Image: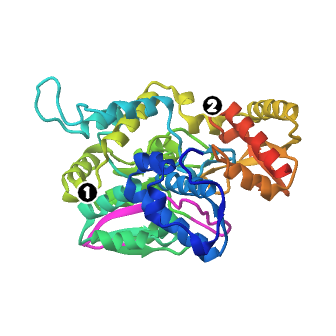
Amino acid sequence: MRGLRDSRVHRTSSLPAIGTLVNQPAYAELVKEFGRARVVEALRRQVADERGAGGEMQDSDRLVRVGTTLRAAVAPKLRGVINASGVILHTNLGRAPLSRAAIDALAVAAGYSNLELDLDSGRRGERAALLSGLLMQIFGCEAAFVVNNNAAAILLALTALCKGKEVIVSRGQQVEIGGSFRMPDVMRLSGARMVEVGTTNRTRQDDYEQAITSRSAALLRVHTSNFRVAGFTEATTLAEMASVARGHELLLIDDLGSGAAEPIADEPTVAESLRHADVVTFSGDKLFGGPQAGIVLGRGESGAAAVKTMSRHPLARAVRIDKLTLAALEATLRQRLSGRLDEIPIERMIRASVEDVRRRAAMWSVKLEERGVRTTLVAGESAVGGGALPGHRLPTMLLALSGPASRLAAALRHGDPPVIARIEKDACCLDARTVLKGEDETLIDAVEVAFKAVAR
């Protein structure tokens, strides 16, 4: 390589000085790309490693090592992956993937936009108005507001509506979900006093009735997210809770969690919740299929007043959504409003039939067999994930790769792009249900590379 003194091997006792190395012509491109200070620091670390190892390094190899170190330091840590795990709302992979329309909307928001400008009057506008009207049309409610996630929505509701007062909630709904989010902790932070009723497995309507005092502000139902209590159980319905709340002129707040806009298994839907609750909160991603956000809906006069109070509370400013989230959520809302559900990836994945999944996996199998990768189609199950529908499984068809399962899974994960598979019955398997449209050829190439790497 031009500019290197030579390619002879140096012993650690005669390693060249850092100043000498960085001034070699061969390092000029690295200095130009990363700056002299970074190259000097990378050289110091490299030379220190060589001394510590007591080994030898050729000048050309050292140049490659330093360049690799520098490029790795500035490479993006957030990378796109192919989700072949069969978990639709995979928390570790960012949960709901965005639709094409939502992704395109991000480009609009990335530049200047009328985020808080009324184009008709030329006066300052309200960003919340860009979404509230759409939400009210979709769900037929009287008020709507959006914050940055559902945890923030619940915290805001409790703080703005119940601070210093009592909120009645079933013991069976004192949940902890991912990231150590605990409902009792949120209640304390809001300044509301939690009043637990019933037992872990059984809570009746009368339990709520007996807990009401002059300090009571609301009844709260909490979605139990990623667990279910089965067996000897009894739960008060939302309609029964609404009867109690109305009888005592209290608010009924429903933390719906996953935000199912369409019926699926036994998951409560937004429409069902709005028939009874004054204030409903849920996630904009998860089953709703948009970006991470906390959606707040208000039903009737009391619900509309509550949402207005929340929107004007000082905490609302701290938890408001940014312009990129707003743009992606608006696009998702417009797709739902026009009935274009098949354009929303999670809707398409959940509703894909076993036959559709089998045909896609079979196509992968044919193409991979042509490249020398041995595969087998086997029946399996997909999961919704993301704390939605725990225990509910979707029948699917897996493509099992022949070879050492753990090594294949690791090779796929370390590929470019990374592919996230799963090991089932001692085989590395790919689930076509969760692979996005347009990723098929990229996936096939990645599997071939991983297969050859393991075979070597």
Q: Nearer the viewer, mark 1 or mark 2?
A: 2
Residue 437 is marked as 2
Is residue 379 visible in this depiction of the protein?
A: no
Disc 1 designates what residue?
Answer: 318
Looking at the rendered structure, the secondary structure element under dot 1 is helix
Q: Viewer-proximal residue, 139 or 81? A: 81
| Residue 172 in magenta stretch | no
Q: Is residue 226 magenta?
A: yes
Q: Nearer the viewer, residue 448 or 294?
A: 448
**With 357 as the anchor, is 204 left or right in this view?**
left
Magenta-colored span: 210-234
- Please state which amino acid type lies under the numbered disc 1: Ala
Instruction: Please provide percent x and percent y for residue 219.
Output: 37, 63
Where residue 372 is drawn, which disc sits there?
none
Q: Position of residue 450 (x, y in %)?
A: 76, 46
Q: CA distance from mark 1 to mark 2?
A: 37 Å
Which residue is rendered at x = 17% and y = 32% of the image?
117
Badge 1: few (under 14), some or many (20 or more) residues near its Cα, within 10 Å?
few
158 or 102, nearer to the observer: 102
